[in-house]
Amino acid sequence: MATAEVTVLGAGIFGLTTAFACARSGARVRVIEAVRIGAGSSGGVVGALAPHVPEQWNPKKQFQLESLLMAKEFWADVAAAGGEDPGYARLGRLQPLADAAAMDLARARAEGAGALWQGRALWQVEPVREGWGPVSPTGHVIHDTLTARLSPRHAAVALVAAIRALGGEVVVGDAPVEGAVVHATGVEGLAELSAALGHPVGGAVKGQAAVLRFDARDQPQIFADGLHIVPHGDGTVAIGSTSENQWQEAHATDDQLQALIDRARLVCPMLTGAPVIERWAGLRPRARSRAPMLGAWPGRTGHYIANGGFKIGFGMAPKVAEVMADLVLSGRDAIPEGFRVEDSL
């Protein structure tokens, strides 16, 4: 490959989508991954692309909305470029409602969604469906049509294929670091940046998740009491995730995951008896602000940061990629308030 104009360090979701956006804009791109594609939390199993509630609006929620709305076209472009399916589908989400107060709040939020979601998605209260769906004490659920799913591992394969099809290079191991450098190195990157700046800018949160063999591929996700139940197109359902600030083994699963699986079967009885075919654990990068951390590396000319996608990284990735490509290639700074690296100084 010719000398790279952009080198992306890290082949997780932020690194690969940023590299794809740069390559699509005509840049010569090299991605360098030290371990393996999706070695960190981007190699997980859940893949829920879900919005924040439509109220108390702020730049983070607006950024996420724009990313979720552009996701269908973005992932279609990835698939078209490289010929691999990332497993994207916008099938919505169901949330049970516990009591009359919860129903009143949900209806109020429906009005907020009508104004804030630009008429491009709905948030509505409706009766529980027969068959697939959560147990709901009121017999009603919130149904939003903005939520989508993505297969984390298939998305990584699709992005690598797309980058290479556009003339880019994806290397696992050592390769020259040339041109502008985007650091998208997850938990390790947050530690490196914290050491360089002399104070913590974020850290790791462990998550555990599971995959069950159950075919609900055309059904919406379920979200109940912090638990995601996500049907995927390969005839599996992903369940996640725990959020653990203390742990002994980063990649070990334990009784906390089994409790999550048991809860999922109570929430969605159709999963009772569905076999568990995979258990996963890993560390997710969380910036101090809990928003993605984007922008120039302070004091290092030509170096940039794209990190901190804790829980919302896959949903934010299309917009993160667009903003980072604009910044790196043309100097256009469209990073919203609260997302900047400087906000953690």
Image (tube, grey):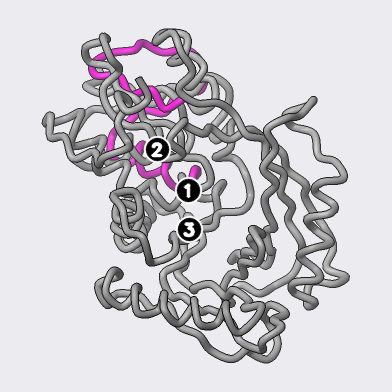
At 40% from the left edge and 79% from the top edge, which residue is drawn? 110
Q: How crowded is the residue under tag 1: few (<14 C-alpha within 10 Å), some, or many (20+)?
A: some
Q: Point out the tag, 3 or 2, that comes first from the N-terminus.
A: 3
Q: Secondary structure at mark 2?
A: loop
> Given this view, does label 3 or label 2 mark the residue nearer the observer?
2
Residue 183 in magenta stretch: yes
- Outermost residue to the front: 101
Q: Position of residue 91 (x, y in %)?
A: 49, 73
- Asked whether residue 30 appears in the rendered view, the answer is no
Kind of residue sitting beneath label 1: Ile
Residue beneath disc 3:
49
Using the image, determine if residue 165 lies above or below residue 277. Answer: above
Kind of residue sitting beneath label 2: Pro
Residue beneath disc 1:
312
Quadrant where the image shows the C terminus? top left
What number is the disc on residue 292? 2
Q: Position of residue 187 (x, y in %)?
A: 54, 25
Q: Position of residue 235 (x, y in %)?
A: 67, 67
Quadrant where the image shows the N terminus? top left
Q: Point out the tag, 3 or 1, that comes first from the N-terminus.
A: 3
Q: Work out whether residue 114 or residue 132 is closer to the camera in this orientation and state it.
A: 114
Q: Work out whether residue 311 or residue 280 is closer to the camera in this orientation and state it.
A: 311
Residue 179 in magenta stretch: yes
Q: Point out the tag, 2 or 1, that comes first from the N-terminus.
A: 2
Q: How crowded is the residue under tag 3: few (<14 C-alpha within 10 Å), some, or many (20+)?
A: many
Kind of residue sitting beneath label 3: Leu
